[in-house]
Image (cartoon, rainbow, N blue to C red):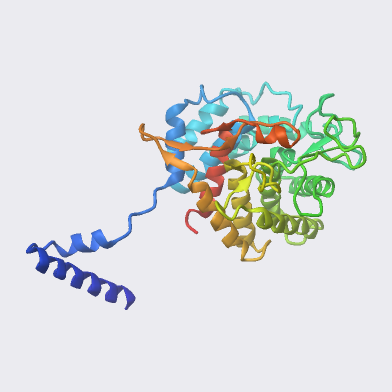
């Protein structure tokens, strides 16, 4: 009935226009002109722009930023079924994985493991055993990978990262773990390990305001570590964003009766409250140093804003968070879309993305380069957009 009334109103408007102008446009033209323009498919636009800029050979080496971006491209493929997107991912991965499944990576850092998600994806999509063999190298490496005294994976197996937990690291390995278990079997271990890692990291890094500090050093020997707590001094936004996405992904994989589920829900809910508190009311985005938005040299950063938006939306959708967080996420989504534009070359540009960042102080973080089309931002954008575009 409502559609009929709308059509009647549009018909009357068309006839009134015809009377005033002396021209009678076809009814179909009048109705079509009254409809709002369809929103662009920004995921497709970003993927098409990025794959036009880089081939699978020139996009970069085996790395977590490229792995993050290509995971976002895979989500776009799953919705659109555009075979070019999956072929591109396969051609990238096949630069590193030989036909016998060997892969020339030592996996001595969590960062080096993130692109392993693509191995699980390609096995799922193609059934080729080479990808299982390559993925198993990451899984087996974890059996001997160094840990803190309470079982947290070090950020890297090196003297400069010894005994350290970085919030970034939970995303680099734990989504891979639960996906590996689902694809190849062994979910009892992979789910338990991923949940344990998120709990151990969260128990060290989360503070009273709900946010996570960037890193923790069990040895208290790093230059940035507080001598009492071992914590880094600041809440760097993308580190918190990595954790927010990882805990959401792992909760999605855990069975309802998993013994750590309530612990992880508690961490996520405290984090969500902190994120809501520190969201910039003017833009809907979040600041490079999350809790210090009042400082004039701080700035809103696009990759973490995408990550927080995704996690809050997914958390509300899945019942991990109160439904009002969907509104918080919607404000974040609109804020991120404001950072996206189309250039004169017809390709998208996503701005204000922090380049890769170590642990530092406030001055260090706010001085980081604000890049355009950095893969950290493009990948986070695609993950966010595929979650919210139909919301």
Tell me which corner region of the image, top left, top right, bottom left or bottom right, holds residue 113. top right
Residue 56, position in %: x, y?
50, 26
* Left/right of residue 141 with respect to residue 102 in the rendered view: right
Residue 237 vs 25, above or below: the answer is above
Residue 31 vs 359, above or below: the answer is below
Q: Can residue 127 be seen here? A: no
In depth, the one of 183 and 304 nearer the eye is 304
* Left/right of residue 77 with respect to residue 130 in the rendered view: left
Q: In the orientation shown, which residue stands out farthest toward the front?
A: 296
The residue shown at (63%, 23%) is 100
Location of the N terminus (image quadrant) = bottom left
Residue 253, position in %: x, y?
68, 52
In depth, the one of 98 and 172 nearer the eye is 172
In depth, the one of 346 and 122 nearer the eye is 346
The residue shown at (24%, 73%) is 9
Residue 353, position in %: x, y?
57, 37
Residue 203, position in %: x, y?
84, 49
Q: Can residue 326 be seen here? A: yes
Mark count: 0
């Amino acid at each position: 009935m409502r559609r009929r009334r709308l059509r009647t109103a549009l018909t009357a408007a068309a006839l009134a226009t015809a009377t005033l102008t002396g021209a009678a446009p076809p009814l179909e033209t009048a109705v079509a002109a009254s409809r709002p323009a369809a929103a662009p498919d920004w995921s497709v636009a970003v993927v098409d722009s990025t794959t036009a800029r880089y081939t699978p050979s020139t996009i970069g080496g085996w790395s977590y930023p490229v792995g993050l971006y290509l995971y976002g491209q895979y989500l776009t493929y799953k919705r659109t079924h555009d075979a070019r997107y999956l072929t591109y991912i396969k051609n990238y991965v096949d630069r590193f994985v030989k036909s016998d499944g060997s892969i020339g990576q030592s996996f001595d850092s969590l960062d080096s493991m993130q692109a392993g998600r693509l191995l699980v994806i390609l096995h799922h999509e193609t059934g080729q055993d080479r990808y299982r063999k390559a993925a198993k190298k990451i899984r087996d490496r974890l059996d001997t990978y160094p840990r803190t005294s309470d079982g947290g994976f070090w950020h890297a197996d090196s003297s400069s990262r010894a005994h350290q937990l970085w919030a970034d690291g939970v995303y680099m390995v734990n989504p891979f773990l639960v996906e590996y278990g689902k694809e190849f079997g062994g979910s009892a271990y992979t789910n338990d390990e991923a949940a344990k890692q998120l709990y151990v990291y969260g128990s060290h890094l989360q503070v009273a305001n709900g946010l996570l500090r960037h890193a923790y050093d069990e040895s208290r020997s790093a230059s940035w570590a507080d001598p009492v707590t071992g914590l880094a001094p600041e809440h760097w936004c993308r580190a918190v964003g990595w954790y927010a996405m990882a805990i959401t992904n792992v909760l999605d994989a855990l069975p309802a009766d998993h013994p750590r589920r309530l612990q992880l829900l508690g961490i996520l809910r405290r984090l969500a409250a902190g994120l809501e508190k520190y969201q910039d009311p003017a833009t809907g985005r979040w600041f490079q140093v999350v809790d210090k938005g009042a400082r004039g040299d701080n700035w809103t950063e696009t990759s973490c804003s995408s990550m927080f938006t995704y996690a809050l939306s997914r958390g509300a959708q899945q019942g991990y968070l109160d439904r009002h967080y969907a509104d918080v996420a919607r404000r974040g989504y609109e804020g991120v879309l404001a950072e996206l534009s189309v250039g004169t070359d017809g390709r998208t540009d996503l701005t204000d993305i922090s380049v890769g960042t170590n642990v530092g102080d406030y001055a260090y973080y706010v001085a980081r380069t604000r890049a355009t089309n950095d893969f950290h931002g493009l990948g986070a954008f695609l993950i966010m957009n595929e979650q919210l575009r139909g919301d």
